[in-house]
Amino acid sequence: MINIFFIAGTFGSTVEYVLRSHTKEYTIEPSDPLPDGSMHGFIHQAHLQNTQLFFDYFNNQQPCNNIATILYPQKDLDLVAMIDYIGGKKFTQSKNILIYCDDFDFAEQNLLFQYHKIAFGHPEDQYFKIFADLDTVDFTKWFTAESALPGIQSWQFREWFSLFYPEMINTWLHVPKKNDNFLTISSKEILFNTQSALEKIINFCNLTLDKDLVPFVAKWQSGQQYILQEYKTVCKIVQATVNKKYYSWSALNIIAETIVQQKLRQQGFEIKCDGLNEFPTNSLDLHALLEPNWRTE
């Protein structure tokens, strides 16, 4: 059994696909990356997206050649608890892969991967459900849970999420102790050293590479570039705005706007955000909305 633990957006589906498409031990129909760069065009063997699916899967005997893709953290179940739960015999007989984010900036960038590959194209109430847990988060400073769906305004979500996400993504940086049946690998390594990372995972799983990875890797890496460029744009926006130098951009999505707001807060500035549903598209207009963050030490 192979278990792939990953944060949404960190390429767990890509790893499963390659294990099943490019090794002698598995067979799957070839599939190209979708237009958004994701590998969501094939049927997973066991895609455990919530706590109930996780418990149902590991409480039943599974075929030894199954590949499970396991999202973490899950509601009321962090990564350490998940690993502890599947301990013992099943765990020691498995090959376990943990994909993690190795620094804050890359974890922050992963929010954009989540937006484009999971939330993009959904109405606003859907992206809100993806990026927030209505059962556990206190929204009362901005809106009530009852009014959040579908009545939340863009400025309200942007303000709340810019304050909320740093603590959330910090949990993605902690890697628990592992044993010999555990391979930890960063999403950055998969993204920038794709072929060697995939070969490392295949070898760790004692599988036999039997197809050329180069054509797939080229297509897959190409499909990720628009998100990398978007994060670079976000960083340029922050730099130009703080320095009051003119820089313009096309309208951003709500998550990119949120990252801009948080990065400006890190630089000691708050945005006059009340009612700001249309985010500026040049640095001088955005600079005019800044005020000092007196809480910054």
Image: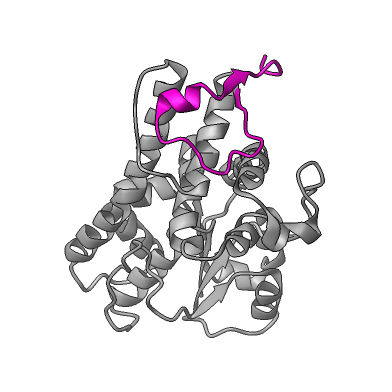
Give residue 292's position: percent from left, percent from top.
62, 16
Give residue 136's position: percent from left, percent from top.
79, 55
**Is residue 72 within the magenta segment?**
no
**Is residue 276 within the magenta segment?**
yes
Asked if one can make out residue 274 in the rendered structure from this viewpoint, the answer is: yes
What residue sits 59% from the left and 67% below the top?
A: 92
Q: Give the residues in magenta.
A: 270-297
Residue 25 falls left or right of residue 153: left
The chief SS type of the magenta part is: loop
Residue 57 falls left or right of residue 240: right
Residue 202 falls left or right of residue 68: left
What residue sits 18% from the left and 61% below the top?
A: 214
Residue 212 falls left or right of residue 278: left
Vertically, is 39 above or below 176? below
Closer to the camera in the image, 272 or 200: 272
What residue sits 62% from the left and 28% below the top?
A: 272
